[in-house]
Image (cartoon, coloured by chain):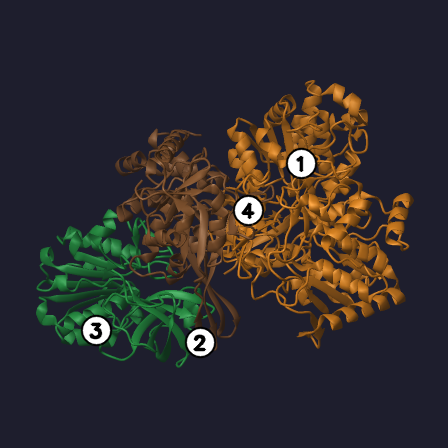
Chain colours: A green, B brown, C orange
Amino acid sequence: MKTKIKGIYIPSKAEIVEILDMTPVIKLFKIKPKRQFRYKPGQFVMVSLWGVGEVPISITSTHGLHEYIELCIRRVGHVTSATNLLKPSAKIGIRGPFGNTFPMKNARGKDVLFVAGGLGIVPLRPLITSIINEKNNFKRIALIYGSCNPTEILFKDDINIWQKKGMHITLTVERKDKGWKGNIGLVTEYLKRPKLSFRNAYAFICGPPIMIKATSNGLSLIGMHEDNIFTTLEAHMKCGVGKCGHCYVDGKYICTDGPIFSYAEIKKHSLFD
Amino acid sequence: MRNSLVLDKNYLSYWLRQIRQKMSLIAPIRVGNLGVVLKTVENIHEIELNCPASIPSAKEFLFPQKEDMFRLSEGTVDILRNDTKRLIFGVRSCDISAIALLDRFFGENFVDDYYMSRRVNTIFISIVCNNPEPTCFCLGLGTGPFLKSNFDIQLTDIGDRYIVETYSKKGSDLIKDYYYLFSKPKKSDYETQYEILLSSQASFEKRINLENARQKILIERISDPFWDWIGRRCFECGGCVYECPLCTCFNVLDRVKSEGSGTRFRIWDACMFKGFTKIAGNIWPAEKKGTRIKQWYFHKLLYYPDHFGKFGCVGCGRCTITCPGHIDMATIVYKIDIGDKRRR
Amino acid sequence: MDKIPTVCPYCGCGCGLYLCVENDNIIGVSPVRNHPVNNSSLCVKGWNCFEFIQHPDRLRYPLIKEGGSFRQASWDEALKLIAARFSRIKESSGSDSIGIVSSAKCTNEENYLMMKFARAVIGTNNIDHCARLCHSSTVGGLAAAFGSGAMTNSINEIAYARLLFVIGSNTTEQHPMIGMHMLDAVDKGAILIVADPRRTQIAEFAHTHLRHRPGTDVALLNSIMNVMIREGLVDIPFVKRRTENFDSFKDTVMKYPPEVAERITGVSAEDIKKVARVYATEKRSMLFYSMGITQHITGVDNVCACANLAMLTAHIGLPMTGLNPLRGQNNVQGACDMGALPDLYSGYQKVADPKLRKKFEMAWRVKLPSTPGLTLIEMFDSALKNDIQAMYIMGENPVISNPDASHAWDALKSLDFLVVQDTFLSDTAELADIVLPAATFAEKDGTFTNTERRVQKIKAAIKPFGESKPDWEIICALSREMVYDLNYRATHEIMEEIALLTPIYRGILHHRLDNNYGLQWPCPDVTHPGTPFLHRMKFAKGLGTFMPVTFVPPAEIPDKKFPFILTTGRTYFHYHTGTMCRRTSTLEREYPECLMEINPRDADSLRIKNMDKVRVSSKRGTIIVSAYVTERTPEGIVFIPFHFKEAAVNLLTNPALDPSAKIPEYKVCAVNIEPVK
């Protein structure tokens, strides 16, 4: 399948319209690309900071809702430390969108469970928004979202909206603070909370690798099909188009064959290393 | 072989000289006592026709070790593509087979413009290996010493003449332009060619069976201590990856000249380095050399055939020649095949 | 696309490679097939040696410091200024108030010109280079023992040796291509003995690994020789026919039986006996050594002990034998050969010898100074005392590479006038009054001499970057501004002069070196094919001399306040002070920060975990590095490489010098370690 993107290695300009501080190390960037493009939930862009480098960042907004795209970036390494210092109206480069997308259509008519750990809510957000927007095509929808502590719960406003629209929400934290009255513990302890018919349900998981492993395992133990559990994997990427080899693991390019894989595929190719 | 022609050796330099008026000519040239390399030809008579099969591959002409991608200055991007027309003469069947696979790799999904613009402007005249090197093992892989398809022009040296075969349109067009140099082969020419090809096939020293190794890996899942033992000898030089005509991994970097200007370039990289998979936050997933070596061999023996239907190896033997620790495809496959997990 | 044959600019292996050039850009590297040193391979530095050449940090034009910062200047202005200042200082304070540091990275021609500049133009013998810091013990020790201080055999013999004794050399990491030949020998059944306190990569392949305490090499080697003498394993005919001073040497060695050595070195008497027996009885035994032997206050003694060992067993003067010091820089052998030394002209001809001095005076048509000059560290000491007022430093970074680096910094700051000539703005160049931009190895012609005395030609692949010039052109241009015009139009002319004045290089001319594997000196005439191994019929000075040496402990040993031994060295991915390799993406990525190797038990006792930040301090300074916990380093010792200017380990090292070679003791000093919160 040849793509129509011309000049796959050439970043196009994008302007930062607004920056929101979500936590001390996580910022939400609202970016207006010079050239609008269509994207689907789960896809990512390669964000280019001239002279510093490029990193793959999942798109957390939903196509069609705004004229800007939203990227949620945590300061972790060399490039993301530089993005952390950017101010609105700064110019960056964008390449993409790359990657495959969540198999939303297959989940129609079934229960859908989202499990997010920490920053894992970021790539799941556009999928949740899309599914809630056509929620009549699905049966019960639920989210289990675990964070380190209450200050690190992201997109609180969105969560309220989703709850109002009928999504079953379970929030949990590893360490509580003074005001927290909710659940404590890891997401794996709350998998059975939403009363879904697991045998036929679909699950979309994202979070740190340990969490993905434990959750996928936990879900398959309570009856979910391994072909119906999906996650999105992270990797070091330099091109995003399946050529540079940095994200190549066990025969799969995370950037073009993924980043979304089913648990069955992950087990077959031991993509967890 | 159907539609073959014959070229008298005396006309070869004339033909190449004519071609050089239209495009850049690259061929094996001897550099004093140092050896033979592929480079732009200044004097046609310096072309070395009897060079070893294993001189550095033509990969660097299509995918250079360092390639500037674009220049940035004051917000405008200047894409740096190379579209010089070139003829590369004197490569071997293994090189051509490798290039056919590189075409598929760089052309699938997202098309790599840099590779493609060099590729479409390059035409190859390959020469059949009458005398394979001791390190060659293309025979068992179907990538040599001669090809039946997927080449531009293939020459077989039958003494005072070449048998000239074409496959691609590019190749046949080039012959058509100089039709007056070629003649029809005689029956004895075909016979000589057949004999030469048979004797070439018979003179391979290494008979390596990659398929057996692949089966063994799939069934037995060769254990980690084997790879760790191999890893002790690895010098982490990257030579196997750099020399392999099928390895294509690269790193992308910016050379900043000043604020908002400079060049973005790509440079050969190797999964043999532990920094290749380094993730932000000082995480090094592939610390052990054995793990990395295992991944390289699995890529070539398992994943490549799964995806492309062919092994990720053309039997050129360059990894054998360049590895300081003597870890190479032939040795590894042999060890896996005979189930050797003993110390060397 | 063109392929230019040249030689790698990193280490003393001198691997042959081609630089690939397309449209005036160097775009790749390819090894020379069947080269006697690297044999179609390259190490990771060689494969990536082209990336720093066209790096934007390259110095483009001369810089003059005004008001504390640099401004761009023209060559004319800069050179005239330098000439004027040097002339003035020479007139008012004498020629010896100027010190010159030549470069082991520059070509033979450039080193020759630099020493000619120092002696004929400035009029001083104060010229030295970094060999002082790494192999001056070799030059001194082997000159005393054999009359010639270089690797006696060749690299392509190694694979056919039957025994390899490697002491104080981390060969597979520092000289990877030589390490490759050693592993080939082991594959063919050779015995490998490694003596190194750390479990280096080559030690993993050794049949016997002697982990002696740092600085105890004399005791170890004397003890090995003690066993040989006692068990009758000495080659008596050889000793009688070709050596002298055996009796005095024997008296000293008999004081080191294995039991005594065991107490001093920590190596078991059994192992000492084993090594002695096998080294003596194997016919083709080669001895290798590197910084672990030379960089001590007993550096010369260590080298003499190695020479004694080779002579005692007659493992010298034959192929597949010999005493083989592995030189560090790509042209440090050449820089020594060219006489960039305070007491020697090219070819190791003594400055103090009136007949030899007269030969150079006649050739150069100028009166030459007769007193040997100051060595490198002495120049810095003199600078602090204001005896040296100006320095001209070419291709060297003493602020990072000198021991007790803050002393070097102070010395350079105290100078009236400092000129630095380099390819990048190094830390030393930052202190200069005038910086001259030099061309890299890919932008000039010339020759390098590798560790096995092989003189090979390098060729320019591209034009010099910006306004930079090859060092030889700069030195000539500068001399033109001063009284004495060096006046050469091309590097082959310089080589012709070198050949005429230097007996060991007599037959080495550029046209003999074009497009081949080079020639190994001694090469006494233009038809001579070069000399693969030395001392065949007799030693360079006739009879070899046994030099009796006694064990002297290192200058600074651990005490309560500084309880650990710090040993410094290099790593595989980086090279020396990092000006080239840290501007290479692959190398920098593989080893991005300074790591201190520490033994797990030591780490536990200090409550340090892997990758924790620690503060390491010595009497002279303190740095912060990350700890790397590994069994490679024994208890009580830590290892820090010196490549990282942000954690410059030479701020800690001890400038204690070997009394005759003046080489600093980089390998042993005492430090304290504490975790950083």
Q: Which kind of residue does numbered mark 2 sit on?
A: Thr
Q: CA distance from mark 2 to mark 4?
A: 45 Å
Q: CA distance from mark 3 to mark 4?
A: 76 Å
Q: Who comes first in sequence, dot 2 or dot 4?
A: 4
Query: Horizontal placement of A151 versus C306: left or right?
Result: left
| Near-viewer residue (B130 or A17) | B130
Asked whether disc 2 touches disc 4, contact meaning CB atoms under 8 Å apart, the reply is no
Q: Which kind of residue does numbered mark 3 sit on?
A: Ile
Q: Residues within 10 Å of mark 1 (few under 14, many from 20)?
A: many
Of marks 1 and 3, the one in the foreground: 1
Label number found at residue A159: 3
Secondary structure at numbered mark 3:
helix
Q: CA distance from mark 1 to mark 3?
A: 73 Å
Q: Chain of mark 1?
A: C
Q: Which residue is mark 1?
A: C324
Q: Chain of mark 2?
A: B
Q: Position of residue C428 (x, y in %)?
A: 68, 62
Of marks 3 and 2, the one in the foreground: 2
Asked whether disc 3 touches disc 2, contact meaning CB atoms under 8 Å apart, the reply is no
Q: Position of residue A273 (x, y in %)?
A: 32, 49
Q: Which kind of residue does numbered mark 4 sit on?
A: His
Query: Horizontal placement of C639 versus C469: left or right?
Result: left
Q: Which kind of residue does numbered mark 1 sit on?
A: Asn
Q: Which residue is mark 2?
A: B76
